Image (cartoon, rainbow, N blue to C red):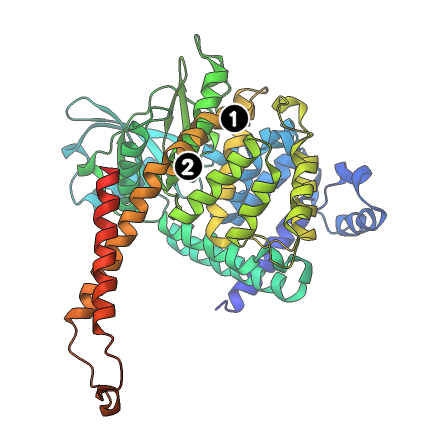
Amino acid sequence: MAGPGAFVRLIGAGWTLLRNDALLPRELDPLYSSGARTLSRLLRMFAGRQAYQGRPGERLARSLERLGPVAIKLGQLLSTRADIFGREFALDLSRLKDRLAPFPTAVARAEVELTLGRPVESLFASFGEPVAAASLAQAHDAVLLDGRRVAVKVLRPAIARRVADDGEVLWLAARLVDRWVPAARRLEPKGFAATVIRATELELDLRLEAAGADELAEVMGQDGYMSAPKVVWEGVGKRVLTMEWAKGLPLSEDEALEQPGLDRKALADNLTRAFLAQALDHGVFHADLHEGNLFAAAPAQLTAVDFGIIGRLGAPERRYLAEILWGFLNRDYEQVARVHFEAGYVPATHSVSAFAQALRAVGEPIFGRAAAEVPMSRVLTQLFEITALFDMRLRPELVLLQKTMMTVEGVARRIDPDHDIWAASDPVVRRWIARELSPATRLRRLAGEAETAVRNLARLAERPPVPVPVDILREDKPNFSPLWFALGAAAAGVAFLVGALVA
């Protein structure tokens, strides 16, 4: 429940954006409707001197940095989509990824000692200055006593209180939008806010991040599209995380894509395939794949860091995602539409064929075209209009998936302007379809279901007998126990037969 302080902070957030002319920036006046242009000019009357310092992206970055961690994460997402918002705007926001103001190294050393319960010198031969500073933490270059180079991540002082305050403001804003903006209710503002708040709260325990990094390192190792540095567990605590140094250069640096021998096409393909392999094959994926968290090395090696946000998908969601992608790959819009209805993404009151027609209008103009030729802002506008037309609501459980898909595509386009997301996706999706929808897999699944049914019947048989009314025991009433026995035997037989066929 948001308290009075949340109202004050929400008003303060609006005032910060207004003073920096970051709500409806003057540079975009020619693109506004007449009403929006009038509102823009009215709001500009309250702007401060800082409203005339820098480009729109610089002013927004300055505002978001002041507003706190949750706002900064929004800026990080926007910075990955130069194809939508423009290269200059995205570049101005890019410093929010890992180039924020650091806190003193002395404070970081003290936090390491307090969290790990040991002197810095007992674990590290050297502990350097911060090399990257983001919204929640900063990373230091260090060397272990055994000579290994590592990155030590340390949470910012008092960051838990700041995240809690941001969460209250976001929750209050979501409630107000849900109450007063009926058109936005299908976007489930409260569900979206809850998902973002929970994900950010989990980032505040670096022991959980270490576990996520270790899990994803195993997952990534099965395909080789991406890798993760090894966790140094003796350097892990609630507010400190130590990992081996990542190979290559962070993609947030321009020099990363100019490395000799770098294959930009293969690198972009590996990024798309790594994300899809994680999500489809394993149901767990790195959910914060912006350029500041990705290191590149020749010829096409990708290393991910910062595993604070981990996304997970259940078996049904993985199947829906794979079948939707497979349908698009084959331009089978009827199939894509049917999956949307089966998953409940589109209300059953609408027509499957009409939705397929709408999907065709989006898919055909972009299929097979190079990324540089596709105006993504126009595509997203069309998709938003279609989702409104068919009463599609945002699914809170898919927020991290959708956000990561948007980020991955944006980063891949920056790596390779001609990136073909469909061609890159094809081998991973095709492999999943061949494995999960094959006759052998279906038989194994049926065998598992039959075995479960037999187990449940056995449990029923072990329960104490239930008192039966006397009239049911009369001789003129049929006895049903042989029927139950026959059903159990039949189920056992089916399970045995299917198991034998699969074997």
Residue tagged 1: 412
Residue 15 sits above or below residue 211 on the image: below
Q: Could you tell whether 159 is left or right of 345 in the image?
A: left
Residue 21 sits above or below residue 421 on the image: below
Residue extending furthest toward the bottom: 470
Amino acid identity at mark 2: Pro
SS under mark 1: helix
> Which of 487/176 is in front?
487
Q: Name the residue: 82% across, 37% down.
A: 30
> Which of 15/226 is in front?
226
> Which of 173/498 is in front?
498
Q: CA distance from mark 1 to mark 2?
A: 28 Å
- Residue 169: image x %, image y %? 53, 59
Amino acid identity at mark 1: Ala
Image quadrant assignment for residue 78 = top right
Residue 457 sits above or below residue 187 on the image: below
Residue extending furthest toward the front: 476
- Residue 247: image x %, image y %? 33, 20
Q: Could you tell whether 89 is left or right of 113 in the image?
A: right
- Residue 37: image x %, image y %? 81, 46
Residue tagged 2: 102
- Residue 114: image x %, image y %? 22, 46
Instruction: Tell whether label 2 touches label 1 (CB within 8 Å).
Output: no
